[in-house]
Image: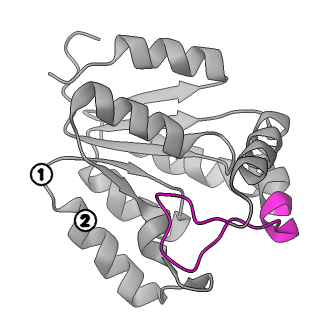
Amino acid sequence: MDGIFMKRILVLGSGGAGKTTFSKSLSEKTGLPVIHLDSFFWNPGWVETGRVEWRQMVTDMCLRSEWIMDGNYSGTLDIRLKYADTVIFLDFSRTACILGALKRLAAHIGRVREEMPAGCAERFDTQFLNWIWRFPRSSRPAILELLDKASPETSLFVVKNRSSLQKLLLELKRN
């Protein structure tokens, strides 16, 4: 898309929406490096990083000159929005996201995905699936509220389905 300056791109959406896959494809197209937040938040054995340490890590990552950053982590969305020049919100149906998560599970169960830290093998997790199911009511409103408060200079794309996402990928380019 002409006239869109992209150096720091934030990719948001429910689990299973395809943030990681899209971010990798966008990186290949633009040459921008990808920061998968999951790979920094999780420690071996699916142990979470502490809140204070996590906010500092995210701030440090945001200070990099260029990035595509994927992941939700609402506790740091305020920080990331300050630095992002482009936000792509994968606002897919809960059914599409559940199916995406199950497809990923089937493809990687028992193995550590490339973007995850060692000791975090893909597993069936009912809490995660419940979070995806609740996302439209529990997480989506807060994300939309924060996006509404983003800088007017921030380019915002709200994408409703995978075919629209593929179309956007074809249109986006790094200026």
| Disc 2: CA contacts within 10 A as few (<14), some (14-19) or many (>=20) | some
In the rendering, at what x and y percent does residue 96 appear? 79, 34
Mark 2 falls on what kind of element? helix
**Residue at 40% in and 12% down:** 170
Residue identifier under label 2: 61
**Residue at 51% in and 45% down:** 20
Disc assigned to residue 53: none
Mark 1 falls on what kind of element? loop
In the rendering, at what x and y percent does residue 16 appear? 69, 46
Decide if residue 100 is on the left or right side of residue 23.
right
* Amino acid type, callout 2: Met
Magenta segment range?
Answer: 111-130
Q: Is residue 97 above or below residue 120?
A: above
Decide if residue 8 is on the left or right side of residue 16.
left
In the rendering, at what x and y percent does residue 45 appear? 62, 86
Q: Nearer the viewer, residue 124 or 109?
A: 109
Q: Is residue 157 above or below residue 140?
A: above
Decide if residue 91 is on the left or right side of residue 72.
right
Q: Is residue 167 above or below residue 129?
A: above
Disc assigned to residue 65: 1
Q: Are marks 2 and 1 in contact (CB under 8 Å)?
A: no
